[in-house]
Image (cartoon, grey):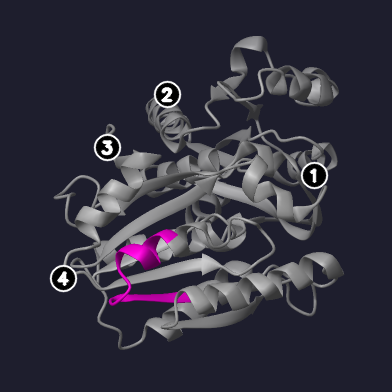
Amino acid sequence: MSGDWILHRGSEVREFCEKYFGQRDRNVALIAGAGFDPRSGVIAEMLATIIPGDLSAIFLRELRPHPESGLQSIATDNAGELARIITQSATRSINVLSEDNAVTAGREAVKAVREEFDGRNVTDVIIDLSALSMGVSLPLLRYFHKLTTTEAPELNLHAMIAHSTELDANISRETSDKVTPIHGYDAEYKLRHDKGETLLWLPQLAPGLRATFERMYEFLDPDEVCPILPFPTRNPRLGDDLLREYLPLIEDAWEVEPGDLVYASEESPLDLYRTLLKVSEERDQVHQKTGGSLVVVSPAGAKLPALGAALAAIRSHVALVYTERLDYELEGQAERYGKDAEPEVIHLWVSGDPYDGGIRSA
C-alpha cells in the first residue's frame, strides 16, 4: 500500500499476481497494445504463465495515417506473438485520426473494448499501458474507473506498465497540430473554461517537443504556467537539458518564476499525483471567491507521470489536454532493446475490492 493506492513494482508484481490472479475465482481480461514497442509482450507473457486458464485479452492496434514501414512490420509481428501467447484473445484496429484529421483514438478505443466486453463474465480488468499511447490508455482507464464505481462495483481495475526510461528516450514522435482535451478528461476543461475560471497550465516537459508546447500555450492561453520537470530521474542531466531546451519559453513567453517549476519523479506515478492533488485543492480554496480555478495538465514523455496525472484527474478538478502522436521513430535496432533496456514492471490497483469509500466514490 502506498498512500491512497496499492502499488507494486519489480519482483513484488509477480508475487502479487501469483497470489491474487492465480486464485480460482479470478477471471482476468487484459487490454494491451499490439504495436511496435518491444515491451508489447512483457506483461502478457508474465500473466500467461500465472493464469493460463482464465485469462483473455483484447489487443489494440493503433492505426496512424503514414506509419513507418519498418515499425509497421514490427507491430504485425508483435500482434501475431501476442495472439500466440494468449490464445483466448481478439485484436482490434482503431483509427487514431478520422478522415478529417480529428482525434478519434480515445473514443474508438473505448467503443472497441466495450463491444468486446459485452456479455463477458470478468472479475478483473488489467490495462497494460506499455505499448499504448496516452490518447488510448488514459481514456480506457477513465472508462473502466467509472464502470467500477457505478455500474459494476464488483469489477476490479488494474494498471500495469513495463517501464524503461532508456527505451522511452529512444522513441521519437511527430505530433499533430491539433490541441485537444484527452477523451474522458475533458468535462472539467469544458465546464470550467466556459465559466472563464483562472487557468493554470502544467506542461510535462519532454525532449524535442518545444514546437508542440508552443502550440498548446497558444491554444490554452493560460493565466499561469508551472512546467513539470523530471526529478529524480535515471539520467541525472535530463532536467538540466530540458531547462536549456525550453529556457526561451520558460523565461520569456511563459514568464515562469524559479519557484513555479514543479518536479516529479519519472519512476513513480504517485509523486506527480500527490503534487497535482495538492495544487488543485489549494487553488480551489484560494479562487473559490474569485471565479474559480482550472488546472490543466499536458502529459508528454514518460508514462508513469502521465498515469499520475490521470489519477489526479480522476480524484480532483484536473483536466488533461494534449496533442496526439502522428508517427513514431525507434532509434537504433529494435531487437536490442529487450536486452539493453530491461523494463521494470509496475502494477497499480486503481479501483475495486480494497477501496471502500473514498477512492471508489471519487
Q: Check disc 3 and give the amino acid type.
A: Asp
> In front here: 123 or 286?
123
Count of numbered tags: 4
In terms of sequence position, does the residue under pointer 3 or pointer 4 come before the other? Answer: 3
Q: Check disc 4 and give the amino acid type.
A: Arg
User: Which residue is the site of mark 4?
Assistant: 24
User: Which residue is the site of mark 3?
Assistant: 4
| Closer mark to the observer between disc 3 and disc 4 | 4
In terms of sequence position, does the residue under pointer 4 or pointer 1 come before the other? Answer: 4
Residue displayed at 55% across by 44% down:
343
Residue displayed at 64% across by 45% down:
339
Residues under labels 2 and 4: Cα distance? 51 Å
Please give the label number shown on residue 212. 1
Instruction: Look at the picture and state if 235 lies above or below 301.
Output: above
> Where residue 336 appears, x then y in whole percent?
72, 49
User: Which residue is the site of mark 2?
Assistant: 286
Magenta stretch contains residue 359 = no
Asked if residue 359 can be seen in this view, the reply is: yes
Q: What residue span does the magenta drawing correspond to?
A: 46-58
> In front here: 137 or 26?
26
How many neighbours does mark 3 have within 10 angstroms: few (below 14), some (14-19), or many (20 or more)?
A: few
> Where residue 88 appears, x then y in whole percent?
41, 83
In terms of sequence position, does the residue under pointer 2 or pointer 4 come before the other? Answer: 4
> Where residue 234 appears, x then y in whole percent?
60, 25
Assess whether mark 2 and mark 3 are in contact (beta carbons under 8 angstroms): no
How many neighbours does mark 1 have within 10 angstroms: few (below 14), some (14-19), or many (20 or more)?
A: some
Instruction: Look at the picture and state if 56 lies above or below 198.
Output: below
In terms of sequence position, does the residue under pointer 3 or pointer 2 come before the other? Answer: 3
Locate residue 288 relative to residue 187 in the image: left or right.
left
Q: Check disc 1 and give the amino acid type.
A: Thr
